[in-house]
Amino acid sequence: MLASLQSKVRGFVFLGILLMLSRPDLALSGAMPLESQIYMAGLHESEWVFAGSDISCELRHKVPQFGQAIFRRIAGDDLFFRINSFQPIPEKLQGTLREVSPAWEHHLPDDLQQHLVIHTGMRPIRLGRKPAGWLLTSLSKGQVGSFDFLDWDDSRRQVHVRLSPVKFQKPYREFKQCLSKLSTEGFETLKESTVLFALDVHDLDKKAKQRLDRLVKYILADEKLVGITVAGHADDQGTRRYNKKLSARRAMTVSNYLVSKGVDAGIIRKRHYGESRPAIPKRSERARAANRRAKISLSRGDR
């Protein structure tokens, strides 16, 4: 009987060794198999939406129950990707980006895994130009892009946020066409803009409005903008007190025009300097024409 018991024990030990060899994840002390939580649009609900202009190009894709995936490029800047989550992520996590082949795709996925940080807040996943381009190429090949990380509330559960390639091709072609036509005028070009005024006038002429309309398109597209300063100026004709008031009216006119076109009034600061800060410190007609102006300065932050 003792021999029989020893034989059974040896059998259990042998089975245990086989189990550990076949599932090394279970061989770790206290380890349990990870549960998977997959967020991905179904075959019939997957949709990619393109929107673009000569200032910005964008592709959007909804990941049900998790958030909105966005590829975007604005004039003068590099391509980037991010996911806006429906709920804030409470803590920073480590994750990976990889390709996964859908059931109908016979090509093997790229075995490259890219490591990334899952950020706190409402924009947890962000990619720069190179990984964003890799992800676009992956989707164009019919592969699924998968962001994998541990659940912040339960480390036994693996979260997979996946981008479906279903209905991707047509919007992607439109996106690429948009990129090829993107304006060369970006932040570095537009961060300092000037509109001119006639003598003793604070109203905008047609040329000034066209200039501001172009600027507004960029302002509304650039999500990194955190501030706009509008500074009014005057030439040296008239009293200093009068010129100070005239420059204030010019700054107000430009500010009001920007707001009327959809710019957030809360990020605009108005300044007026009268004749004290000439663009050209001379008394010629050419200098005075250049000094009757409003200067619009854009500032960026990390949003």
Image (spheres, rainbow, N blue to C red):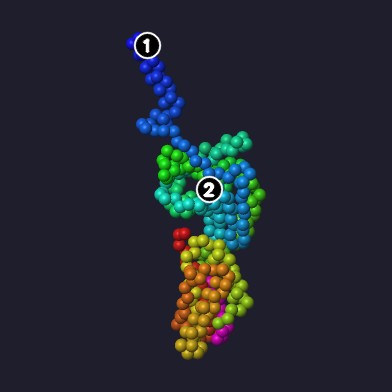
Pick the residue in front: 95 or 292.
Answer: 95
Pick the residue in front: 67 or 222.
Answer: 67
Q: Residue at x 62, y 36 (%)?
A: 104
- Can residue 141 be seen? no
Q: Position of residue 182 (x, y in %)?
A: 60, 59
The residue type indicated by label 1 comes to Ser
Q: Which residues are magenta?
A: 193-201
- Tell me the SS state at disc 1: helix
Distance CA(mark 1)–CA(mark 2):
56 Å
Q: Residue at x 44, y 48 (%)?
A: 117
Instruction: Indicate left or right for 5 with 181 as reference.
Output: left
Is 174 rendered above or below residue 155?
below
Q: Mark 1 or mark 2: which comes first in sequence? A: 1
Instruction: Indicate left or right for 213 with 223 as reference.
Output: right
- Tell me the SS state at disc 2: loop
**Residue of label 1:** 4
Q: Position of residue 61 (x, y in %)?
A: 58, 50
